[in-house]
Amino acid sequence: AAEGRAAALIAGRDEQDDGVVGAAFSYLTAVKSGAALDDALTILKDGEKRYEQAAVKMLGAAGRAEHAAALRQKYDAYDSTPAIRQDILLALGGLASPDSFDLLAKVASDTGAGKVERMYACSSLGKLGDAQAVPILVKASTADDPNVRAYAVEALGRFPGGDVSSAILSSLRDAHVLPRTAAVKAAGALGLSDAVPALEYKASYDPERQVREAAIDALARIGGGRAF
């Protein structure tokens, strides 16, 4: 019943207070409801600026793979703002459409792109699960910006394999806490036994508490005699 009322507020958005409509979007997005997806698509198509970001986030949370085309079209639109493009890149990961790979790969590889766009593109490439993303993410894991490196390493944690393991082990030595933490978590997610000696060191001596705690968790996930 609540989903229906929220969807009705969005459908009648021209007669409603913006704050109420925004709350309806937030609710449906939080519960991953598809009750107002048609309205979200209409908002993007018609360029209703007030609700574009909310519509993108809803599509990313509750949409289906076939909705990704509308998001990619909006990304390339002449009037798309940087904030909208960032939200679209993040939403495309949630929809997991294989057709989004080329756009995400292009942005993740573009050293001239904004750091947030590259971060979100890396994250969504990981969610797509296409192994073609591995060399792109490995390269991004050495980017100048530590935030981009962290997102790339986190995404690598979804892909087992030799190149991935090498990149994660290398990132354990990153000078910045964010990619270092991401590498520790990725090692645990993949169960990298080769990382145990480095994780042992991180758990005991890393200067950042969050890295030490993540290393303890990773050791527990990897398991085995030395880890325990």
Image (cartoon, rainbow, N blue to C red):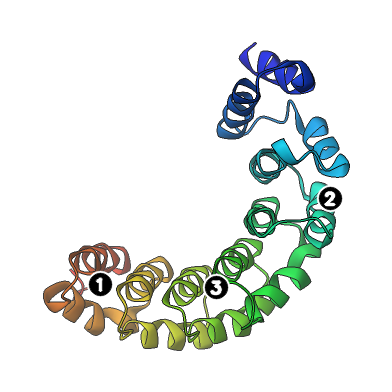
**Residue at position x 55%, y 82% in the image:** 140
- Quarter of the image with the C terminus in it: bottom left
Q: Earlier in the sequence, mark 1 or mark 2?
A: 2
Left or right of 194? Residue 147 is right
> Where is residue 130 drawn, in percent x and y?
68, 70
Disc 3 packing (10 Å; few <14; some 14–19; many ≥20):
some
Circles 1 and 2, Cβ within 8 Å, touching? The answer is: no
What is the C-alpha distance between the residues marked 1 and 2?
47 Å
User: Which is more toward the observer, 138 or 36?
Assistant: 36
What is the C-alpha distance between the residues marked 3 and 1?
21 Å
Q: Earlier in the sequence, mark 3 or mark 2?
A: 2
- Would you name the residue on which mark 2 appears? 70
Report the mark closest to the observer, 3 or 2. 2
Q: Amino acid at mark 3?
A: Phe
Q: Amino acid at mark 1?
A: Gly
Circles 3 and 1, Cβ within 8 Å, touching? The answer is: no
**Residue at position x 17%, y 65% in the image:** 209
Residue at the extreme top of the image, as rendered? 1
What is the C-alpha distance between the residues marked 3 and 2?
28 Å
> Where is residue 193 drawn, in percent x and y?
33, 79
Relative to residue 4, is residue 63 depicted above or below?
below
Q: Which mark is residue 159?
A: 3
- Would you name the residue on which mark 1 appears? 224
Q: Secondary structure at mark 2?
A: helix
Within the image, what quadrant is residue 131 found in? bottom right
Q: Earlier in the sequence, mark 3 or mark 1?
A: 3
**Residue at position x 61%, y 85% in the image:** 135
Disc 1 packing (10 Å; few <14; some 14–19; many ≥20):
few
Residue at the extreme left of the image, as rendered? 204
Left or right of 181? Residue 53 is right
